[in-house]
Amino acid sequence: MRSQTYSEYLALEELLSIQREKSDGPEHDELLFIVIHQVYELWFKQELHEVDYLCEQLDGNNASRALSTLRRVLTILKTLVGQIDVLETMTPLDFLSFRNRLESASGFESFQFREFEFALGMKSPAVLDRFADHAFAFDRLQTRLEAPSVWQRVLRYLAAQGAAIPTAALERDPALPTEADADVQSALVDVYRGDAALMQLCERLIDLDEGVQEWRYRHVKMVQRTIGTKRGTGGSAGVEYLQSTLFKPVFPDLWAIRADL
C-alpha cells in the first residue's frame, strides 16, 4: 500500500491552484496581494479554532491550558501584524495597477475576522446585514453572535474560582457587546490584590487586547499608505472608517481598574 505524500496530505495541488489573478498580464503584485489575504484568512481560521479551544478550557476550569492557548493566539496575532510588512513593500502605484479588478470586493467582507471580533465580545448585530446574501457567512456570524464571548467565559471562570462577579454580568445576554461594568471592576480589583494566578490570566487578556489594537493600527497605516484618503473598494469609507475603530478596548473593565490598583 502506497504511503501518503507530503503534497497529498496538504492538498498542495489544490492549494496552489486557487491564486487566480484577474488583471491583464497579470500585474506582478496581484499575486502577492492574493497570497497575503488568503494566508490571513487561514490564520483567522486558526485563531477561531484556538479561541474555541480557549473557551472549552475555561469552561473546564483548566487554567494552565487556557494560558497556553492564549499564548498561541497572541503569537498568531503578532504573525498577522508582521505580514503587513510584506504587504507594505507594494507601492500605491503597484496596487493601482490591478485595484479595479477587485470590483466590489473588500476586506470588510472578511466574515472570519468579524467572527473573531464576535468571539472576543466585540459584537454588533448590524454586521450581519452585510452578509444577508451570503448564507454560509450569515449563519456562522449568527452562531457567534448568540454564543457567550471569551470575556463572558472568563467571568464565569473567575466566579467558579470564588471571585465576586455579579450575577447580572454572568447572566447578561451574550448577543450584547462587552461594556464596562463598575461592579465587575470592583470584583476584578479584589482578584488582582488577592490571587496572583487569576491576575496572570487577566494580564494575558490585556496582552490579547493590545495585540488586537496593534493589528488595527498597523492595518490603518498600511491602508493609508497605499490609498491615502480614497474610498475603499466596495464603496467603504476606507481609512476614515478604519481610524474610527482604533483604541477601542476589547476588555474595557481590565483597563478601567488600572487606576484603582
Image (cartoon, grey):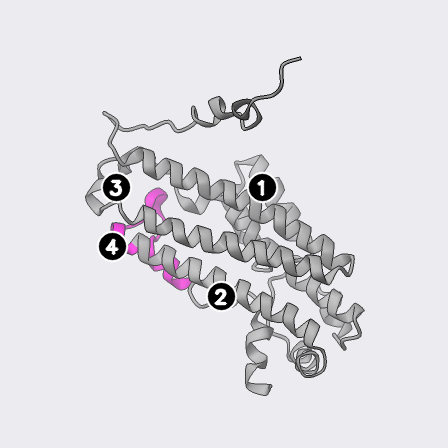
Which image quarter: residue 172?
bottom right
The furthest residue to the top = 1
**Identity of the amino acid at label 2?**
Glu
Q: Earlier in the sequence, mark 2 or mark 1?
A: 1
Q: Nearer the viewer, mark 2 or mark 3?
A: 2
Q: Please state, as top left, top right, bottom left or bottom right, where the C terminus lies in the image.
A: bottom right
**Identity of the amino acid at label 4?**
Gly
Tell me the residue at 44%/51% (across/down).
80
Residue closest to the eye, 149 or 16: 16
**Identity of the amino acid at label 1?**
Phe
Tell me the residue at 59%/48% (across/down).
48
- Give, as a single range, the part of the protein colored magenta: 224-244
**Count of numbered circles on the image:** 4
**Identity of the amino acid at label 3?**
Phe
Residue placed under numbered mark 1 in the picture: 138
Left or right side of 215 for 6 = right
Whole-percent x, y for residue 221 in the image:
32, 58
Q: Is residue 106 visible?
A: yes
Which labelled disc corresponds to residue 95?
Answer: 3
Whole-percent x, y for residue 191 in the image:
70, 78
Which image quarter: residue 60?
bottom right
Q: Earlier in the sequence, mark 2 or mark 4?
A: 2
Whole-percent x, y for residue 25 in the image:
23, 25
How far apart are the alpha carbons under marks 2 and 3? 29 Å
